[in-house]
Image: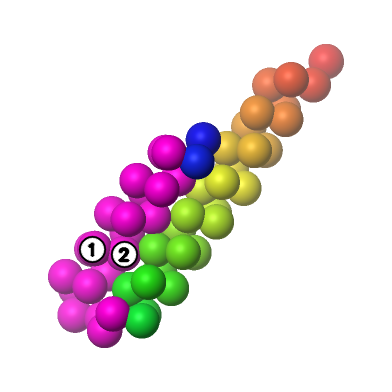
Amino acid sequence: MLLTAGIIGGVAGLLSHAAGNNIPAAILTGGGAFAGTVALLLAIAHYAGAE
């Protein structure tokens, strides 16, 4: 989960920087994408494990 979230966060940060945002804004964008991906994958894992 963390590897997938790290890749998605890194790509989001790079795309944000390529779109013209400054470095701190791109880092915040990548961090937000990372946190959102971890939350989504944890919710999916919890739902899949529920009986």
Asked if residue 36 is positioned above or below residue 45 in the image, the reply reads: below
Closer-to-camera residue (11/2): 2
Q: Position of residue 20 (x, y in %)?
A: 19, 80
Left/right of residue 17 with respect to residue 47 in the rendered view: left
Q: Which residue is mark 2?
A: 13
Q: Which residues are magenta?
A: 3-23
Q: How many marks?
A: 2
Disc 2, disc 1: CB below 8 Å?
yes
Viewport quadrant of the C terminus = top right
The image position of residue 22, as x and y in percent, is 26, 84
Classify mark 2: residues with Cα within 10 Å, few (<14), some (14-19) or many (20+).
many
**Residue drawn at x 43%, y 38% as measured from the top left:** 3
- Residue 30 circle label: none
Q: Which residue is mark 1?
A: 15
Residue 26 covered by magenta stretch: no
With respect to residue 26, does 4 lie above or below?
A: above
User: Which residue is farthest right?
Assistant: 51
**Residue at point 51% right, 48% down?**
37
Which residue is rendered at x = 57% and y = 37% of the image?
41
Residue drawn where x is 62% and y is 48% of the image: 39
- x and y percent of residue 25 in the render? 36, 80
Magenta stretch: dominant secondary structure: helix
6 versus 31 height, above or below:
above
Q: Amino acid at mark 1?
A: Leu
**Is residue 29 found left or right of 20 in the rendered image?**
right
- Three-letter code for the amino acid on which mark 2 is drawn: Gly
Tell me residue 31's x, y (percent).
46, 64
Q: Secondary structure at mark 2?
A: helix
